[in-house]
Image (tube, rainbow, N blue to C red):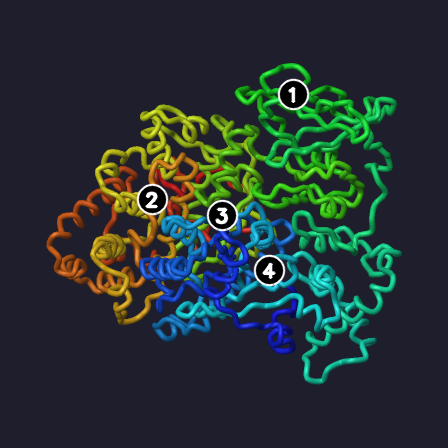
Amino acid sequence: MGVRGLQGFVGSSCPHIYTVVNFKELAEHHRSKHPGCTPTVVVDAMCCLRYWYTPESWICGGQWREYFSVLRGFVDTFAAVGIKLVFFFDGKVEQDKRDEWVKRRLKNNREISRIFHYIRSHREQPGRNMFFIPSGLAIFTRFALKTLGQETLCSLREADYEVASYGLQHNCLGILGEDTDYLIYDTCPYFLISELCLDSLDTIMLCREKLCESLGLRVTDLPLLACLLGNDVIPEGMFESFRYKCLTSYTSIKENFDKKGNIILAVSDYISKVLHLHQGEKKLEEMLPLGPNKALFYKGVASYLLPGQKSPWFFQKPQNIITLDKQVISMSSDPKSKQGVSIYTESESTQEVPMCTEPESKQEILICTEPEPKQEVLCTEPESKQEVPMCTEPESKQDVPMCTEPESKQEVPMCTEPESKQEAPMCTHLEIKQKLPVGTDAEFNFEPSMCTFPEFNLEVAQYIYPEIQYEDPLNIKHRIKQQVTMVSDPEILKVAQTHHVQAESYLVYNIMDSGEIECSNTLEDELDQALPSQAFIYRPVRQRVYALLLGGCKDDTSICPAVKEWFVYPGNPLKHPDLVRPLQMFVPGGMPNLKTLWLSQEPAVQVQRSDTLLACFNLSSSKEELQAVESPLRALCCLLVYLFVQVDTLCLEDLHAFVAQALCLQGKSAAQLMDIQLEYINPRAVQLGSLLVRGITTLALVNSACGFPWKMSEFMPWSMFDGKLFHQKYIQSEKGYAVEVLLEQNRSWLTKFHNLKAVVCKACMKENRRIVGRAHWNSHHTGRWARQGSGPFRTSSAYGHSGQGQSWRDQGSGSRQYEHDQWRRY
């Protein structure tokens, strides 16, 4: 995320806002000014991935042991001067940013096509100018930092807001990242990760006060400027004509500035010389051509306001009223008023409970309340002592808020007992439209700051929902949440949220909370029709995870809610998400309960967790063989069995390469791996490396959903996969080298190699999948390796025949619903 054109403008036109600073000196100054307070730098980790990934090889799937060593050096350097680091990762893509996310993913697809074209033409890795970060880098960085003992957090919205909030609230030394939005937020100092010299700890600090001096603005004007220029919330074209008018009337155009630079100066000049004249007298929409984009524009400006901050550009609303659907409802709790309503919102709530208004009115206003309150939640009028109960103890069966259907007038309980098996009613889009404020899009989902900073921001609320006028007479510092979750149990959802925020799980909370997940680009060759996309290969696993997390799908998956998957694969235009339904799975002993898997401390439950994990990969029949394999090779075997059963075009040589590299990796240091020289780069091996890495991320999802039967550290890639080492073994195996050569003449690994190979082959045979060598395979299946129209992976078939029909490239675009395991042979 960032402000259009601001980075280039600052770099070329405002060099005086750049200041060279030294972290060690800053830390010493901070300690002298704040005795007993540890100097803390909050790190936007997503901005730092390219800086951290310094291994020379990036094309083969990732040099994970080298990368882990780099991260350890980064952390140790700051620790040596007494600086604490707090790392933030993006937890989800906000709906308002989806279009921008799609645009970047499609651009990445074009870059990946260029990369594979280069590999086929030159048989070598492209230069750093075509660098593409290895698949799963952000996910594995989270777990690597936690392994290194660092405080690592995952956001409940896009991370930049929470980074800025954390820096402000905790009086941090500064923010380390690479995003011009940190110049807009009124928060602690902003340092550039790209300019950091780790040896000296020197970097560049960007001063927003000096930027304002250059532009003739105040710091509180910066959010307004950012939205007029365009960012990830405000499309660039929305104010294009307005910017042009500013430019044509601007009298101080600098010949040495480019067009974007002059636009920034012109818009700033308009704010300072025109808008300031009428500030406080006129509404902003009267001074700007907002038109139908008023609500979006106000939301964009409000998105920069951190907890406790206000914008002088927001016209003050009348006090003490809520206006909804042309109906005025008094905010007073005066008993004489027939429409008395008091609002109280619980900060960490995720469950929605309607607050009742005038008894004769069927209008509802959604309010968030604590899912498990210990006592009655009361809200009192400042001038009145009268208390109005909003929700009672869940164990009590009295005073349960009721939701009245507008047409049927039938009452439906909205708050149920936590142990109750009754599910809160799922809202369809039609129902949502009835419950949201008039004019609010049913797809709209505003997620304020993470639970660490649950402050109610009145300015944000007023302009996110312009149809509602709020008053905050008690200065209640709580958040409003307009959302329908996929899971009705608030306790289990809160556990999922905690794991998510602490960066301990992967995708679980997103599935349970909003039913929407995404996966970015993978190095996949769109011209290679023999290998399916990882999005399809691992989809059956995800479908079983959906069944586990969402529940209620034991007999008929068609009644289960579909999960929206924004997965990037060749041929997908990303105009709509794929709607993917849960897939019923068999778990020995029956489908487990999430509370049991996640919360129980009974020893027997650990076995159930492991059984569920294997069931997600449909490997229950190979439980004994897989359990006999030690970690981390057990995880590798699970993934290999699943891959070889799913994909027909994998052969014995591929298996040899995967197993040999895992064994040889055990005895190699990061330096030794760095010294490996590859004869050439094979595009198929590149895709296979990325395919296995995506399998590891899928395993992280499954492990999270099953209550962590395996330690995450047991199957991280630096323990079982190295891209360059795999590439070396793949080339050797493709040339027909003996197993002894693949194992570098280490006889102690020979027995283990044959044991692991036997486990994989035996498990595949149980699924009627025989792994054969490429020469034997080609002689019996002429043309299958280069086929363009037949299915290269196994499909659901009652007779166990591999698919020969529809190409995998045509099986996932648009918004098609996936209700069955289409790629598996039984």
Mark 1 vs mark 2, foreground winner is: 1
What is the CA distance from the residue labelled 3 to the residue labelled 1?
A: 33 Å
Residue 367 x, y percent position in the rendering: 69, 33
Residue 279 x, y percent position in the rendering: 84, 59
Which of the 4 quarters of the picture holds residue 653?
bottom left
What is the CA distance from the residue labelled 2 to the residue labelled 3?
A: 31 Å
Circle 2 SS class: helix
The residue under label 1 is 392
Q: Is residue 355 above or below residue 578?
A: above
What is the CA distance from the residue labelled 3 to the residue labelled 4?
A: 19 Å
Q: Is residue 491 above or below residue 138?
A: above
Is mark 1 in CB contact (under 8 Å) with mark 4?
Answer: no
The residue under label 4 is 1
What is the CA distance from the residue labelled 1 to the residue labelled 2?
A: 49 Å
**In the rendered structure, which disc, 1 or 4, sits on the residue that comes first in sequence?**
4
Mark 3 vs mark 4, foreground winner is: 3
The three-letter amino acid code for the residue at tag 2 is: Tyr
Circle 1 SS class: loop
Which of the 4 quarters of the picture holds residue 602?
top left
Mark 4 vs mark 2, foreground winner is: 4
Which of the 4 quarters of the picture holds residue 121?
bottom left
The residue under label 2 is 642
**In the rendered structure, which disc, 2 or 3, sits on the residue that comes first in sequence?**
3
Circle 4 SS class: loop
Q: Nearer the viewer, residue 298 or 97?
A: 298
- Alpha-carbon neighbours of circle 3 within 10 Å: few (<14), some, or many (≥20)? many
- Alpha-carbon neighbours of circle 2 within 10 Å: few (<14), some, or many (≥20)? many
Q: Is residue 791 visible?
A: no
Q: Quadrant of the C terminus?
A: top left
